[in-house]
Image (cartoon, coloured by chain):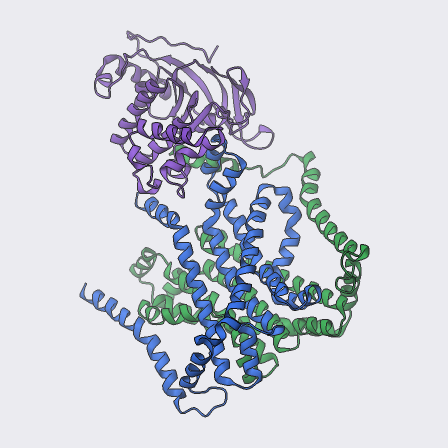
Amino acid sequence: MIARALRSRLGLILEVTVPLAIVAAWWIASAGSTSFFFPPLSEILDSFRETWLFSHVASDVVPSMLRLAAGFAIAIAIAVPLGVLLSQSKLLWRAAEPIVEFLRALPGPALIPLGIVLIGIGSGMKIALIAFGCLFPILLTTMDGVASIDPVLRDTVRVLRLSRRDRIMRVIVPAALPQIFAGLRTSLALGLIMVVISEMVASENGVGYFVLSAQRSFDLPAMWAGTLMIGLLGYALSGLLTLVERRLLRWHRASKASALSS
Amino acid sequence: MASSVTPSIEAGVAPRRRAGGRRPRLDAARILPPIVSVLAVLALFELLPRVGIVSARQLPPSSEIVDTFISQLSTEAFWRDIWSTLQGWALGLGIAIAIAVPLGLALGSTPLLHRALRFVIEFLRPIPSVALIPLVVLLYGTGLTSKVFLAAFGATWPLLIQVIYGVQDVDPVATDTGRMFGLGRFQRMRRITLPSLLPYAATGLRIAATTSLLLTVTGELVIGAPGLGHSIDLARTSAATTLMYALILATGLVGIVINSAFRRMERRTLRWHPSQREVAA
Amino acid sequence: MLDIQNLAKSYGKDGDGTAAIGDVTFSVAEGELVVVVGPSGCGKTTLLRTISGLLRPTSGSVTLRGRPVTEPPAEMAVVFQDYARSLMPWLTVADNVTLPLRNKGMSKADCRAAMEKALASVDLERFGDRYPWELSGGMQQRVAIARALAYEPQILLMDEPFASVDAQTRADLEDLVLEIREQYGMTIVLVTHDIDESVYLGDRVVVLTRRPSTVLESLTIDLPSPRDQIETKQLPAFAHLRAHVYRAIRNRPEPAAADLALTPAHEGRA
């Protein structure tokens, strides 16, 4: 017992100190750095403060996040209904399968040149590509979710003679939501990749544009600061999604827990 | 109690053997829809530029794209691109495996180590590896190393996470049983940990393979490392639109091959471990 | 009211697979409570799913007030054994009960009133805002019953409704079914493998054989009403009926001294 308590306390200490130690090690190791590629951490943080608090937030972070939000929202709005629809009929899915398989296996960035040719280099192209990149994980997990709906629940829906609208909005989609969230998580990561790359390839603002232009003007501290910013954005967005998931799927965890305990 | 199994009866007793006369019709129902839909899509993309809804300069008719694709198959440059992309993909995936599997085994079986590094992993994981592109270009230039670095960085995380889950999910009763029968640490690893880890590892491997391809193509496209991604962008800038579409088609086909190979492998490990299916999503 | 004629159900293509129901014929009168009892795994659930229109029979027919049942009919409600899987965990108890009413063309206020009345008749009026998983198993099954009641069906089918709860809860729920029946006056068909339960609840007990099921006998239960968990079960007639059903299921011959007041009506075997 004592050993276990000690170990758990040690774990807590390590969990807090190791990340701090890594940052400290970076700080110390880079303190006197004259390397062009690895400027001292203090310089990176200075640059971070200058650029991101808050002069470049409106000019670069906001446009990137707006594009991501728009693309993500479009992907959800298309993928969830389409996933439900394709789950309804075997014939429909067989017809759609080769096209879906091709598009989902196609690495999204390969479509950036196509986007430029078809739509141009504006925000519309980026949003379209982000939406495309996010679409397939959500589509496939939605279908997984619908397919794994409990047979008793299916029977229940039939004997309750729900309207089509209630059947979809109040039963099918909520029941598939845990799987849909797994898709959203993958999509968010892909979406951020698409934001950064599309801004690197063709843009005049956004975080992707910022890091690449910092690199091209050999402002290494700014480049590092930009990379750090993208990392923080990824971390924050993933945390945000977890919060939304906790809220929306409270019933899922709770009902699973109660099924286990009874 | 009896009825709790009933819903699966229909699926369980599903007809394995079909009445002979019905077979052709059933197979037609299986084969026709995908063929019809693919033809319909090709026809649509043939008509859009022909009728003039989209300019043929932006979207050439599908027959021309397919023609170009087929003629590309006999060019050396095309196969060199395929080879470059596959090389970057395989090296990226290989490095990811070499890092993630031992690290995942260590972290999964040593709770203290896992706790110490948990925050670091949780912080690094959602960072899009593409954010490192500018740095990577400065460090490694625009060649193979850069795209392999990106691919390896991106592919390591999903595999690492799955391996950690897999090791942690090993049934403690099984481990205790193994210990009671006098199996050594290595034996326990081989006989108990490995089999229950396998489905998780296969899922992680599939995700890592897809990620590695995604980042290889991205590296080629953004950095200009030779490969399909670079040639696609080159075709765009030199206004060879039809070639661009043909190369995108080829990239998608490479993706399908990799994807379905790894999914088949995953399904094989999942088959004898069906309880893990939920995690696979 | 409900007529089941020569019903047969086999799984597999063209019905040449496993036969679950061999040949079942019985009918249920208006307002009657019929309990279908049979050994475990005798295809009771398949029978109920076929009666409710969830499954198509391989042959034979189900008619409800003269109309053939091919889909779950509007005047029918079903309570499943697996309450945990038939309630929607993402909806509150009140929303679960209201859900099927939304398609009935009722006003919001009427829906609410029907929901409250139904929850009150299962003693859950204070739990409308809770979620199913916050309740015990017995309470969850009461929610499922309330959902069926709020719908005000003319016929209620129940598939082993109390098989997943503990003994005390089970007795309470049995009495709840009898109360509801008094209160709403609906026709009820209940499927169970519990012989005591069948005799205690039923106006009539339909005894099934092992699969492929056929009707072994249809037994009128003339125990006095209202029934009581202690007093009814102490009656000698209860014990006799119970023993009779038990022997029928176990396929044992009736002892010579058949002095009990049985009126076996061999409808199904005619």
Q: Is residue C56 above or below residue B235?
A: above
Position in image of residue B201 (x %, y %): 47, 62
B220 lies left or right of B207: right
C165 lies left or right of B38: left
Where is the N terminus of chain B found, in terms of image quarters? top left
Hue used for the chain lettered C = purple
Residues C184 and A203: in front is: A203
Q: Residue furthest right?
A: B50
* Residue B137 visible, this angle: yes
C120 lies left or right of B249: left
Residue A24, image quadrant: bottom left
Hue used for the chain lettered A = blue
Residues C2 and B206: in front is: C2
Residue C114, image quadrant: top left
Q: Residue furthest left?
A: A2
State the residue at coordinates (48%, 84%). A221
* Residue B162 visible, this angle: no
Q: Is residue B190 above or below residue C196?
A: below
Q: Is residue C235 above or below residue B218?
A: above
Can you tell which chain is drawn green?
Answer: B
Position in image of residue C31 (x %, y %): 40, 15
